[in-house]
Amino acid sequence: MIEVTLLGTGSPIPDARRAGPSTLVRAGGQTFLIDCGRGVQLRMKAIGVGANGLTALLLTHLHSDHIADLGDLIITRWVTTFDPNPVPLQIIGPPGTAEVVDATLKAFGFDIGYRIAHHADLTSPPPLEVHEYTDGMVWDRDGVTIRVAPTDHRPVAPTIGFRIEHGAASVVLAGDTVPCESLDALAAGAGGLVHTVIRKDLIDKMPMQRIRDICDYHSSVEQAADTAARAGVGILILTHYVPGIEPGQEDDWRALAASVFDRQIEIGDDLHRVEVHPGVCAKPAS
Ligand SMILES: [Zn+2]
Ligand SMILES: [Zn+2]
């Protein structure tokens, strides 16, 4: 079984009820954080996961809403790990990730210096290893594999989606993308598909062109559902709601997805948890 928790279901627009985009995936005793949006560690704390308990951080792309709390995550993991030989945090993302991580370490350079000066047992900066990929197998450890494929969020590029597998269970995390063939292939036959969505029908009516621009490079609810249907996935898990879903409006969003995808649809607030069991996908991709 793979467990998916929507830690943050928000977007760049601050929302009192929703943290920024972040999803936690637990599989085979390993814990993966996918993106680290605003407030991610508050939500992790709520389910008993510390930064020091993460196996790896997977970044779909380098938009601010998806990496807003990268510095907080790196520093917190560093100062709350008491092992004298700490395991480096594995960070997997698209090209550009190493530059962002380096710049983040620079931004926190004073803090890192203060802490090394103050604590005798902290003798070096946060240990981490960055791996940049656009395609292929990127992880194979203790029965868990992770595959990466390009997505289409242009002009934001490169961007990637992840497919995490454990035994016969599988979950794909699409990130921000419009429908594309490489995502279809990555998601083919997956048990679960976590997809970010916007309501183009609502956003298109907004007066600010800058807000309407976001329709260009995101999937609508119906497009995400169509990707799920084409790929023959078992469970469609929607997140990154733009605009934020108001209380009582969940059924409207669900109905839009259900008009295209006739299997299990999950929509929820922060901390919504979904179990993806082996063999949940019984339907061949169309
Ligand atoms: Zn984005
Ligand atoms: Zn986003």
Image (tube, rainbow, N blue to C red):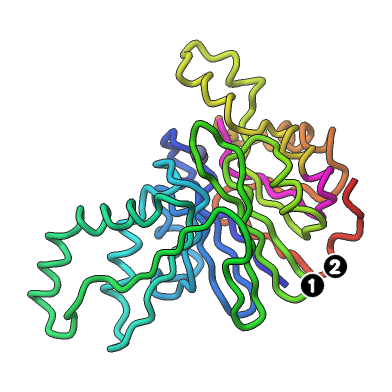
The residue lying furthest to the top in this view is: 207
The Cα atoms of the two marked residues, 2 and 1, are separated by 6 Å
Secondary structure under the numbered disc 2 in the rendered image: loop
Quadrant of residue 114 in the image? bottom left
Residue on which the image places disc 1: 168
Q: The N terminus lies in which quarter of the figure? A: bottom right
Tell me, yes or no, whether the two marked residues, 2 and 1, touch with CB atoms within 8 Å. Answer: yes
The quadrant of the rendering that contains the C terminus is top right
Nearest the viewer among 34 and 257 is 34
Whole-percent x, y for residue 264 in the image: 81, 50
Residue that carries the numbered disc 2 in the rendered image? 279
Region of the chain picked out in magenta, as a range: 228-242
Residue 131: % across, % down: 45, 64
Please report the residue visible at 55 percent of the width from the left and 51 percent of the height from the top. Answer: 270
Position of residue 166 relative to residue 94, above or below, is below
Seen in the image, is 67 located left or right of residue 136? left
In the figure, 131 relative to 183: above or below?
A: below
Query: Residue at position x 40%, y 60% from top?
Result: 41
* Residue 35: % across, % down: 48, 54
Q: Would residue 169 be found to the left or right of residue 133 on screen?
A: right
Let me know if residue 102 is in the magenta part: no
Residue type at mark 2: give it. Answer: Gly
